[in-house]
Image (cartoon, grey):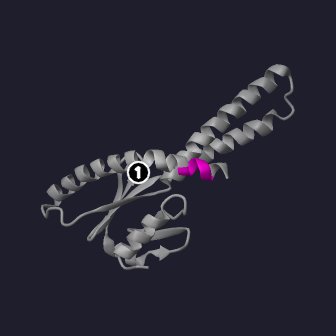
Amino acid sequence: MMNNIMQKIIQKVTQGAVTAAVDKAIVKRARKVAQEDGRGWNGNFQSMVSGYYTGLSLQYLGTVLVVILVVSMAGMWFTGDREDLWVFFTITVLFVIIMVIVKRRMRVIVYWAGGIMFLDRKGNEIIQMPSQALYQAVIRPSKIIIPWEGKKYIIYRNIQDNEQDVKKMLAFYRLE
């Protein structure tokens, strides 16, 4: 419940900034790719996020929770109540691991008539592939799995995160 509320707040606050940053990075990358290929950039591109708002909300909530747990552990240590210290430590480590995993899932997906590109949360290119790769994708309610060059690339679908954008992309390629 709290995570959903936090996701909506973060989405409203950051959506404009994320979109502007993504558009700037994409235009720069598109020009570079067009110069390398010598073909020029044909048509417009669309962008969407995968796991971005979920990752940001978990990062903020998780950071607050980890701080609270660390302060609680310090209090337990100084008061001599060390019986359950390992439980708090285990929970803290699990939250840190989950936060790292969720942050790695934060992606920006750029697509156009001829291709699709995955960027990480810092705007670095992960992979660029032709749009035909989507026609071999496994489309599930929770994710889209795109096999390409022996690896699988995943677009996570989430009602609070990107479901409308995923439907728009699938309609763009006439897949759904």
Residue at x-position 62% and y-position 45%: 97
The residue to which callout 1 is attached is: 120
Instruction: Give the magenta range.
Output: 4-8
Nearer-the-camera pick, 174 or 155: 174
In the visual, does 114 lie left or right of 157?
A: left
Determine if residue 140 is in view. Answer: yes
Looking at the rendered structure, the number of numbered marks drawn on it comes to 1
Residue 123, percent from left and from top: 36, 48
Which SS class for mark 1?
Answer: strand
Residue positioned most to the top? 78
Number of residues whose C-alpha sits closer than 10 Å to that of mark 1, classed few (under 14), some (14–19) or many (20 or more):
some
> Which of the 4 image quadrants contains residue 116?
bottom left
Residue 51, percent from left and from top: 50, 55
Residue 130, percent from left and from top: 30, 70
Whether the magenta-drawn stretch holds residue 165 is answered as no
Q: Amino acid at mark 1?
A: Asp
Determine if residue 152 is in view. Answer: no
In the visual, does 101 lie left or right of 162?
A: right
In the visual, does 1 lie left or right of 18?
A: right
